[in-house]
């Protein structure tokens, strides 16, 4: 089998942010691949591909923020357009 990561996620009370089906059906190279999602006892969980390596937050603690770097901004804009295109 494949290694996966399971994450508990916060969903707004109105349910906004819960629809990840478009991300399962329409992957983007800059977004970890989602496999499934489930609500258990009112809480949302997602199953995604496992990526080995350091968490972005930890990397930024050690090396400084990356949001100002041009390559990060370009990747972020591509991801944002992809999410909007698919209604996420």
Image: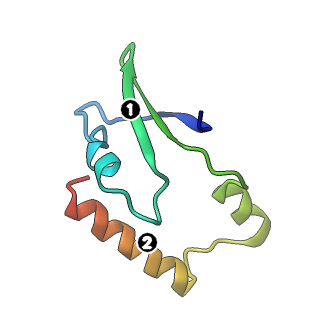
Label 2 vs 1, first from the N-terminus: 1
Residue at horizontal 28 percent and vertical 30 percent from the top = 13
29 lies left or right of 80: right
Residue at horizontal 31 percent and vertical 36 percent from the top = 12
73 is higher (above) or lower (below) than 38: below
Q: Determine the secondary structure under disc 1.
A: strand
Alpha-carbon neighbours of circle 2 within 10 Å: few (<14), some, or many (≥20)? some
**Quadrant in which residue 77 is drawn:** bottom left
Q: Which residue is mark 1?
A: 37
Image spot of residue 39 (x, y percent): 36, 22
67 is higher (above) or lower (below) than 51: below
Image spot of residue 62 (x, y percent): 79, 65
Q: Which residue is mark 2?
A: 76
Residue at horizontal 38 percent and vertical 67 percent from the top = 79
4 is higher (above) or lower (below) than 82: above
Q: Determine the secondary structure under disc 2.
A: helix
The N terminus lies in which quarter of the figure? top right
């Amino acid at each position: 089998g494949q290694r996966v990561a399971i994450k508990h996620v916060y969903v707004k009370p109105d349910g906004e942010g819960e629809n990840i089906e478009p991300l399962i059906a329409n992957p983007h190279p800059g977004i970890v691949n989602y496999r499934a999602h489930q609500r258990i006892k009112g809480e949302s969980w997602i199953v995604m591909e496992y990526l080995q390596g350091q968490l972005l937050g930890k990397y930024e603690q050690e090396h400084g923020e990356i949001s100002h770097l041009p390559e990060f901004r370009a990747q972020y804009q591509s991801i944002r357009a992809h999410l909007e295109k698919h209604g996420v």
